[in-house]
């Protein structure tokens, strides 16, 4: 009796996730299935292809030459399938049926409403997820999200489209009573309030400190911008945040000094990320909507916080 050698779509999804995660446990976490289910899917693929696909003894895990060939095939299958589905939906109802989009909190807090409203003209249903960069990146890699707006460019990922949106400068916030201190003196006078290391801002803060040759006396660590600002307001320490983080909580800046950090030399870039060829012109359309929304609504808010911010924060 001839063995069925059909390859299941779901198993290809497991292979793609495993190749990105580089471990069975991490792939299971991203897919929200058990590790044994991941192992079983890979075993089924190996039986169907009569090939060894994964070098299990390597750390981090890697694919064999056959595994890499099947991975390339899987990417092509996903791209072509999604492209066809989106094209058919657009042809039949004049709109893409659904788009799952992720936005980092600092972008979503100020721009989600106008951006989603603009997208709605092109998509029948929009599902929005917000959060910190790391969790959103995982959701994009596991295909839970179709489009991602983030400061994490997923530099190691191939076959994706990256569209730069906004330059977001870093600033220093400190109790107003310490506004005249030099940064080196500030670092020794007050504890540092650190943003979560899991976030892009948290990681970039450490890089900035090293560039400035400043040792951070970190005594507090939060994943909430509101908490960071409130602790500065209560004179518990100082912090480094991006300008866009401040917009949502501008009402908390009483008794808080927002200081220019080396004339905007240090900044992050917020980009739109989508899988190549799957969404045709939609990513470019969303990028244009996002840039217009920034110019129309955010620049005025930034100027109210500090006039010089509009010279440092802009669309790119």
Image (tube, grey):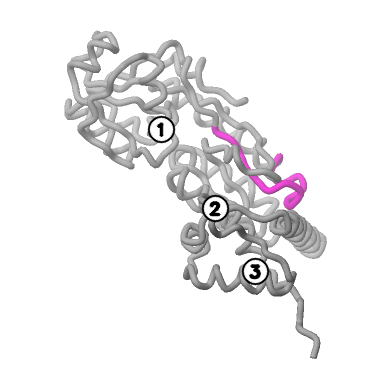
Q: Residue 95, how many percent across, how many down?
A: 73, 57
Element type where label 1 sits in the image: helix
Query: Which residues fall within the magenta stretch?
Result: 270-284
Element type where label 3 sits in the image: helix
Q: Is residue 122 found left or right of 219 in the rendered image?
A: right
**Most foreground residue, 303 or 14:** 14
**Most foreground residue, 223 or 155:** 155
Q: Is residue 238 found left or right of 135 in the rendered image?
A: left
Query: How much space separates mark 2 and mark 1, taking CA atoms?
Result: 28 Å
Q: Is residue 72 found left or right of 149 in the rendered image?
A: right
Q: Which residue is at 69% across, 69% downward?
A: 9
Badge 2 density bin: few <14, some 14–19, many ≥20, Cα 10 Å: few
Sequence-earlier tag: 2 or 3: 3
Q: Where is mark 3, residue-wise?
A: 11
Query: How much space separates mark 2 and mark 3, taking CA atoms?
Result: 21 Å
Q: Which mark is residue 212?
A: none
Q: Which of marks 1 and 3 is in front?
A: 3
Q: Where is mark 2, residue-wise?
A: 58
The N terminus sits in image quarter: bottom right
Residue at the front extreme? 57
**Most foreground residue, 192 or 225:** 192
Q: Where is mark 1, residue-wise?
A: 203
**Most foreground residue, 178 or 96:** 178
Element type where label 2 sits in the image: loop
Say which quarter of the image contains residue 246: top left
Say if residue 31 shows up in the picture: yes
Q: Is 63 covered by the magenta stretch?
A: no
Q: Residue 32, how many percent across, how many down?
A: 48, 65
């Amino acid at each position: 009796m001839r063995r069925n050698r059909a390859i299941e779509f779901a198993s290809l999804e497991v292979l793609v996730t495993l190749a990105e995660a580089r471990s069975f446990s991490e792939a299971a976490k991203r897919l929200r299935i058990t590790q044994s289910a991941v192992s079983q899917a890979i075993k089924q693929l190996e039986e169907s292809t009569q090939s060894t696909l994964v070098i299990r003894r390597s750390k981090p895990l890697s694919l064999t030459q056959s595994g890499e060939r099947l991975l390339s095939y899987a990417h092509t299958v996903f791209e072509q399938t999604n492209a066809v589905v989106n094209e058919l939906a657009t042809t039949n109802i004049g709109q893409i049926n659904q788009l799952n989009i992720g936005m980092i909190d600092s972008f979503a807090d100020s721009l989600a409403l106008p951006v989603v409203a603009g997208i709605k003209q092109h998509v029948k249903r929009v599902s929005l997820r917000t959060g910190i960069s790391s969790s959103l990146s995982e959701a994009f890699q596991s295909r839970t999200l179709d489009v991602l707006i983030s400061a994490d460019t997923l530099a190691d990922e191939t076959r994706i489209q990256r569209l730069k949106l906004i330059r977001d400068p870093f600033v220093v916030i400190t109790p107003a009573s310490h506004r005249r201190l030099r940064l080196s003196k500030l670092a020794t006078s007050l504890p540092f309030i650190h943003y979560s290391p899991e976030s892009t801002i948290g990681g970039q803060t450490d890089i900035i400190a090293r560039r400035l040759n400043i040792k951070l006396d970190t005594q507090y660590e939060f994943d909430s911008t509101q908490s960071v600002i409130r602790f500065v307001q209560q004179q518990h320490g100082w912090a480094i945040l991006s300008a866009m983080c401040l917009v949502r909580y501008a009402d908390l800046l009483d008794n808080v000094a927002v200081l220019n950090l080396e004339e905007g030399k240090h900044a992050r870039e917020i980009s739109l990320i989508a899988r190549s060829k799957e969404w045709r012109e939609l990513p470019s359309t969303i990028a244009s909507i996002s840039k217009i929304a920034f110019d129309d609504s955010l620049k005025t808010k930034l100027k109210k916080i500090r006039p010089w911010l509009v010279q440092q924060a802009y669309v790119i």
